[in-house]
Image (tube, rainbow, N blue to C red):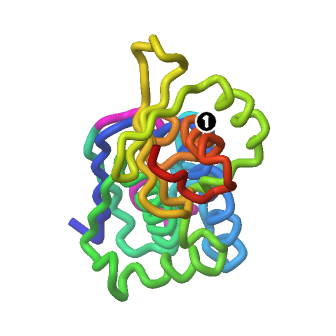
Amino acid sequence: MGYTHYISRAADFGAAEWADITAAARTIIRACEGRGVRVAGPHGYGAPRVTDAEIALNGSVDDAWESFDLTRETASWSFCKTNRAPYDLAVTAILLYAARRSPSAITIDSDGEIDGADWTPARELLTELGLADPRPTRRPVNVAALDARAAALLVTWDGDGMFSVRSGSDATTWYEVVATTDDPDTWTCTCHWAEHGGVMCSHVRAVIRWGGHGDALPAAA
């Protein structure tokens, strides 16, 4: 069949995830071209497509094999046979970044050894480009806005590092914040902004504010 990579999609990429993945794809494509790897559109000519909906590319002219296509919204299984053509570097680096950035949405497999020599060039390229650890920061730049929203939230200490955060004492919607260390980067929340490892949310900020002493855990009530 030829050297092939396999892509399993369980969910859509979130907006922040896709923005990071497409930005990384553009950087990876530029880096590949800087190394003499010709990357073209999905049919082997023109420019690769990196849009709000998809990433589609192939090798150029004589180096083209199967097109690589990664879409933001899908739940499916697909594959891409690169046959180890030069553009395989772009494909494997993008797949590896996406799988690290959003493990809940994409799982990858390969005829090659992902943790071995076959994917070493992709791992090295991501490291060189500063893309080896794509986990998003949990220290946002909009802390003031988050704190403004957090000021209206009610925090209840549940014990053992667990907090309930509500918009008021009668609120039927509430979120659970788990804070088991003094480092807020490790805290989690059940809201949809934070549940998949996204940026820090107003609920976490509410717990920090409730503690009254910076980022340290508040004492049990």
Is disc 1 placed on a helix, strand or loop? Answer: helix
Q: Can residue 187 be seen from the camera position used here? A: yes
User: In the displayed structure, would residue 21 be above or below residue 131?
Assistant: above
Between residues 178 and 17, which one lies in front from this camera angle?
178
**Residue 27: x %, y % from top left:** 68, 62
Residue drawn at (42%, 33%) of the image:
164
Magenta segment boundaries in residue numbering: 60-75
Label 1 Cα neighbours within 10 Å, binned few <14 / some 14-19 / many ≥20: many
Q: Left or right: where does residue 129 sit relative to residue 120?
A: right
Q: Amino acid at mark 1?
A: Ser
Residue drawn at (45%, 53%) of the image:
179
**Residue 21: x %, y % from top left:** 56, 52
Residue that protrudes farthest toward the front in the picture: 221
**Residue 58: x %, y % from top left:** 51, 57
- Report if residue 200 lies within the magenta region: no
State which quarter of the image contains the N terminus.
Answer: bottom left
Residue drawn at (59%, 26%) of the image:
153
Between residues 211 and 28, which one lies in front from this camera angle?
211
- Report if residue 74 lies within the magenta region: yes
Name the residue that disc number 1 marks: 202
Q: Quadrant of residue 4?
A: bottom left
